[in-house]
Amino acid sequence: MREILRVEGLKMYFGGLKAVDNLDMSVYQHKTLGVIGPNGAGKTTLFNAICGVYKPTGGKVILNGQEVQGSKPYEIARKGIARTFQISKPLHDLTILDNIIAASGVHQYTGVSSFFKKSHTREVVEKAEAVMEMVGLTEIARKKARDVSLGYLRRLEIARVLVTNPQLIMLDEPCAGLSNFAINEITELILKLKAQGQTIVLIEHNLPITMKVCDRILVLNYGQKIAEGTPSEVQQEKQVIEAYLGEEDED
């Protein structure tokens, strides 16, 4: 298996708070890694440190053998890491199609003027339409993002990721806040991406989904890795049961 991403001794401190503390992890090509843990465990902070939202306090983020820690988010995106967010952040006044077209320009747009000059070429539009069809957005292509449901916005987030041709997709709680029907649709979409050979890192609180779609699972608690392994291995770890699974049972 080819290692696409390696994190070595990653630290993300906010004053005395160790949100991510000396974390090691690897992501392998064509595999899906799940990141789980209770609220406040450091999962989204880990994503932010990898994707350039935060500059790590210490440690390394190595993408295809090249250190990228401390790079700007757009630089990380251009290198091949694309991510979604817990809270969908579309361009509300643009259509679904134009939202996807805008995202496709991460490798070429340098400002608003270049967006209008380069964005709506036949090649770019056709690519955006193909991605829309794959994620199930074609029927609402001309609707503005502000006028569609959360389930569609989650799919839009994934579409905007895919149109950049990423080497690594990072999904931050794509099922959060969705109905059971929409959750099933997103789960099927993730499985479809896996079948296409995409490399994915997934944060998801819905454990049955995580266990279903992930090849390996990494468990965080208070910013530290407390377990890692296959879904069946992780479920049997005492520390995981106490820190996470037990918490769910109590709820």
Image: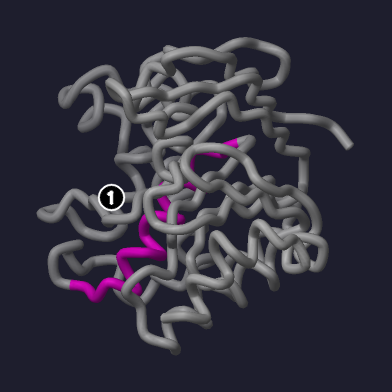
Coordinates of residue 172 in the picture (x, y in percent): 44, 52
Coordinates of residue 193 in the picture (x, y in percent): 65, 59
- What's the magenta region? 148-166
Can the viewer see residue 77?
no
| Horizontal relation, residue 19 to residue 131: left or right | left
- Residue for badge 1: 99
Can the viewer see residue 22?
yes
| Horizontal relation, residue 238 to residue 21: left or right | right
Residue 210 found in image quarter: bottom right
**Is residue 188 highlighted in magenta?**
no
| Horizontal relation, residue 218 to residue 130: left or right | right
Residue 191 found in image quarter: bottom right
Looking at the rendered structure, the secondary structure element under dot 1 is helix
Colour mapping used in the image = one colour
Which one is in front, 244 or 217? 244
Residue 179 found in image quarter: bottom left
Q: Is residue 94 above or below residue 133?
A: above
Which one is in front, 105 or 196? 196
**Is residue 150 highlighted in magenta?**
yes
Q: Is residue 194 above or below residue 250?
A: above
Task: Residue at 44% x, 27% y: name it.
Answer: 49
Q: Is residue 238 above or below residue 83?
A: below
Task: Residue at 70% x, 52% y: name it.
Answer: 32
Question: Label 1 sits on what residue type?
Answer: Asn
What crowding class fits label 1: few (fewer than 14 Cα within 10 Å), some (14-19), or many (20 or more)? many
Task: Residue at 21% x, 73% y: name it.
Answer: 148
| Horizontal relation, residue 61 to residue 95: left or right | right
Task: Residue at 40% x, 37% y: name it.
Answer: 45
Coordinates of residue 171 in the picture (x, y in percent): 49, 52
